[in-house]
Amino acid sequence: MSTAPTRDTGIAAADEATLRKALSPTARPPRASAVSAILTFGWRGMLKIKHVPEQLIDATLTPVLFTVMFTYMFGGAIAGSTGEYLQFILPGILVMSVLFTTVYSGVALNTDLTRGVVDRFRSLPIARPAPLVGAVLGDSVRYLVAATVVVIVGMILGYWPEGGLGGMLAAMLLVVVFAFGLAWVFTTIGLLLRSPNAVMNGGFMALFPLTFLSNVFVEPETLPSALEAFVDVNPISILVTASRGLSEGNADAGDILIVLGVAALLTAIFAPLTTHLYRKRN
Amino acid sequence: MNSPMSSPSSPAIEATGLVKSFGSTRAVDGVDLEVRRGSVYGVLGPNGAGKTTTIRMLATLMAPDEGSARVLGHDIVREADAVRDVISLTGQLASVDEDLSGRENLILLGRLLGLRRADAKLRAGELLEAFGLADAATKLVKHYSGGMRRRLDIAASIVITPQVMFLDEPTTGLDPRSRNQVWDIIRALVAEGTTILLCTQYLDEADQLADRIAVIDHGRVIAEGTPSQLKASVGSGALHVRLLDPDQRDEAERVLAREFDAVHLEADPAALSAPCGDADRAAEALAELARAGIAIADFSLGQPSLDEVFLALTGHTAEGQDATPEAAAA
């Protein structure tokens, strides 16, 4: 990918006949189905991962640093040994890194709005929620990539899922499903705030305390009781407990159901809200 | 696509009393438009006149507060999807995805419009070739020049030939060569039967392309007609003169006042202009200046600018200031 300006050969490079042919009326095919439109927007998301990998790197580098830092700095103090702490913290880091990535779904939508490409999408005869559903689905691939990176780094450092690779994969999928639901919160914010930076700042400001006030880093029993009460009901804690359970092979079905329920609830509220805001935008 | 309201002789675009307010500002304040099928209709006005808001309502991006409009017989609010089936929009901001390549942008649009993958690729290749973008096909759009981006934007609008095309300031910010290329594309599209609504700040552009022009100011249509009608109502053009020595401007004004009905002192302290459509009279006036010993740095005889159109139609310039005392007195 060169950053040098692309040379403009001008339209003269094409001959008159080519231009005529391109401009001659084309028959209009039947409208794209909702599924086809959604998949096309998902494809657009994939292309963005390919062309602008920086966001993915941003979103995976921080958790990788956290894994390494927390394991080696606090592992001994918190859990007695770095190996034991890594075993405890990795599913939490997995959750944290994927959830941080969801903020970028809102940032990407807001960036689209500042660029005018959304005007074109909104003037097309396609199913209204297709650009949004497609984008969030495309982003789910991004979440899966982030999850994979964290797990691989963890395993390089010596992490081993007691529940086997199948359990690990199930944990990753659960986290991605939850991220799909959470992403709709950030797409809503993405349509409400003025600039991509505001979405980024607002998103992390909301997500940071929620992530740290959970059981990602420490056992809740070690916390003051008021804080412990909050940590226990924090959906992120329940997600961390469920993915720990899945990767260790002792998951509680109730936890998994709660996680899926919260994801469904977030989607049910915020996906229609995002679509509404997107349609009503002037 | 077959609406009972739409017959071949009915207008392509029909708008009645369109109103759109943002807060206490009436951005569009009762706009009526009638655009004949297969024609280019120019909407001419300065920034903030309400051009973009009008186009956004007609392209179903926002609903009017009052009034109604039909595009090929389809109501823009109640039959928005039917309208979207026949239009395409080239917005003021380039409506293409900067993070994708030119080819990917066109394939994306083709797929969204219902083309099969192979057909979408074929069509993308054809358009890139025709618009001189084949060499840059796989480059990301963010590395394109302004002219290339505009051409891609227009190509994206005609992946499937639209019956009605909205172009919002398609040449703003382009160099003359790129501008001419965009004009050529627009002419070719019209020749193939597409109806075009063209918003522009340049009288020159509207004059070059449009069959009819509506001049819009503060959200209202203040004049409507063919380019020649419009220019006749404004005066056919102006002689612009810039002097070597600004101190001689008062004297130059007296000399020119003998030749012309009105002389306008411009913001540049060495420049002045006078309405004039006739090259012979202009030559005569320049000769008079030379005889009076006034040295000229440069001069031009040109069509009235948007500023002059506005001055003639509204008494204020396109920037919204009141007419200067000199012009008012002249």
Image: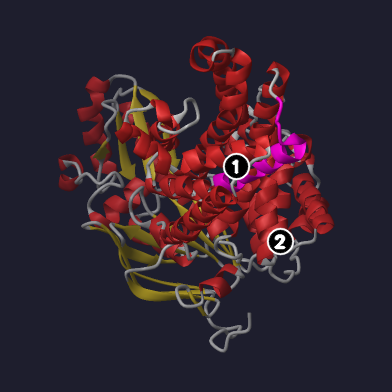
Asked if the stretch drawn in magenta spans residue A171, the answer is: yes
User: Quick one: label 2 or label 1, which is nearer the N terminus?
Assistant: 2
Q: Is residue A115 visible?
A: yes
- Cα distance in 3D space between marks 2 and 1: 26 Å
Mark 1 residue type: Val
Q: Residue at x 53, y 57 (%)?
A: A264
Q: Mark 2 against mark 1, which lies toward the viewer? A: 1
Relative side of B14 to A193, left or right: right
x, y (%) of residue B234? 34, 56
Looking at the rendered structure, the kind of residue marked 2 is: Ser
Residue pictured at 69% horizontal, 51% vertical: B108
**Quadrant in which residue A276 is drawn:** bottom left
User: In the rendered image, which quarter contains the N terminus of chain B?
Assistant: bottom right
Q: Is residue A66 left or right of residue B22?
A: right
Q: Can residue B147 be spotted in the picture?
A: no
Find residue A137 and report its horizontal and vertical position in percent: 63, 50
**The disc label shown at residue A175, or none:** 1
Question: What residue is disc 2 on?
Answer: A36
Task: Please report the bounds of the magenta region as a residue range.
Answer: A160-179
Tell me whether marks 2 and 1 sit on the same chain: yes
Magenta span has A134?
A: no
In the rendered structure, the answer to whether residue B95 lies left or right of residue A9 reads left
